[in-house]
Image (spheres, rainbow, N blue to C red):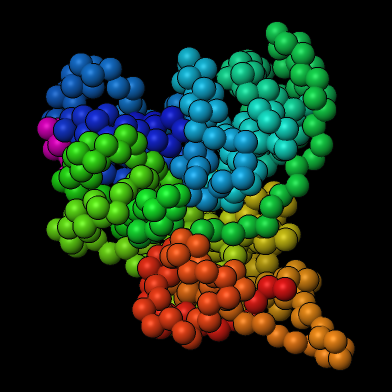
Amino acid sequence: MEHIIKINLMGGYVSAGDLYEILLIAESAGARDLRFGNRQQLYFTVKHSDLETLEMEMLRVNIPYEVDADEHANIISSYVGDTIFSNESWLKEGVYRDIFDLFNYQPKLKINLVDQQQTFVPFFSGNLNFISSDISNYWHFYIRFPKSNQFYRWPSLVYSDDIAVLAKITEDVVFAQKEYFFDQPKVNELFFYKLVSSKIPTSLSHRSEPLKLPDFYLPYYEGFNKYGNGQYWLGIYRRNELFPLEFLKDVCTLCVKTRIGQIYTTPWKSIIIKGIEQADRIEWGHILDRYRLNVRHAANELNWQIEDLCAEGLSLKHRLVREFEEADIRTYRLSFAIKTQPKTGLLGSVVIKKRSPGTFDIQHTRDFNPNNKDLIVYREALEIEDLAPSLAELCEYYYSVAARDKVAANFKKPKDDAGKSSQRLAYQCKNCLNIYDEQYGDGLNGIPAGTRFESMDNYTCSVCESPKDDFTIIQAVA
């Protein structure tokens, strides 16, 4: 008999030293691999005979954990994308850390803390969703009532220092009044507001306007990538979701050696290491070589969400990705979720939902933005062999119909003096979808504006370092 051990990593980060301690404990209890979950937590399995050893070691180092349970939800955040996927927001490392420090309890409800300027971490996959506003240190607050798809927008903005208190009050109200707010088809929102607001110690005065969702774009989150002042970040994804403990121990050791303090987990079940210096990059490459880890997966394999520890969902994902690859289906700006259980909270542009053994429904959000909460049924009761063709048709629909207005606006051709349309070209990496535009050059590679693409012999992508031959010609945005 095996037991599943779950450890929540608040905010989706952990110090290299703490992770190394966890790895040693897992190893002493017989674990050989580790997984990361949709909520930036970690899992490993141990045999029943080794459970007592693990419990003693966890008690010694005071690490909260759960055995075969999911009573306490991890607080997830977009902190993982700070400085690499999100640079323009007031929401920086210090704000995240200050908010995390205010949580002096382990939540039972799922809490999301996300920057509205990014789309790497989902907005509404939690029960309590705090999304940064345009006003510094103020947040939108959206509640998704547990075991339901009913959302309620709190009428005022929430100050950063009040997030933990408001989250605890909301959770207490929900669990004290389960007959009204837990697993209910319809919730009395006014009753809920009165109960929660009566317990809030401070006044929330900034009135909240509805959040305007940014267009969805999933950045390529794998491989070595330049950012900042010549540093690199490294993203590592595992097709089977398993990270060898020995590999992670070497990662922690090198982090400590090169003075990298933290390792980040993502909602896409991968990890990111930031702050790698150019001089240390060779050593990181040696670790990838030693464990034969590939960091060049196709973008259409990285945009999937499946339930944690779900062999059925993972197998279906592998099958559909293979069929997508064989059919050469474009999935740029789309994301997919596979739900084998009801009410799991996974979000995607396209949702494949298990209906019964061997049959599935396909749904999509109204505007194909995974952060939109409004789902539309596209196909029902499909056999598994019919999924890929139907998904291909839906992708075609997205590009030919649903995205037509957006594409027309973004790629409108400027007119020359004679009134004729002129066209400016750019070059797009087929691996990470990064674009080289001659008009702007490439600051990360030190290439000035106006440099012609054809004139560069040894150009490599500034994001994933793919060679020049991996770029295709596209029409530049006017």
Marks counted in the figure total 0
Depth order, front residue of 400/212 = 212
Foreground residue among 440 and 87: 440
Q: Quadrant of residue 456?
A: bottom left
The residue under the point 66% across, 27% down is 137
Q: What residue is at 62 percent from the left and 41 percent from the top? A: 89
Asked whether, in this view, residue 116 is left or right of residue 69, the answer is: right
Q: Image check: 253 left or right of 306?
A: left
- Residue 308 can be seen, yes or no: no
What range of the chain is rendered magenta? 27-32
- Magenta segment main secondary structure: loop
Rendering coords of residue 73 (x, y %): 47, 30
Q: Is residue 278 above or below residue 56?
A: below
Q: Position of residue 265 (x, y in %)?
A: 39, 43
Q: Is 260 colored magenta in this rendering?
A: no
| Residue at point 43%, 70% (across, down) | 461
The stretch drawn in magenta includes residue 29: yes
Task: Please indicate, yes or no, whether residue 149 appears anywhere in the rendered image.
Answer: yes
Q: Which residue is nearer to you in this view: 189 or 249?
A: 249
Is 58 positioned to the left or the right of 241 in the image? left
Quarter of the image containing the C terminus?
bottom right
Residue at 58% of width from left, 39% of height from top? 114
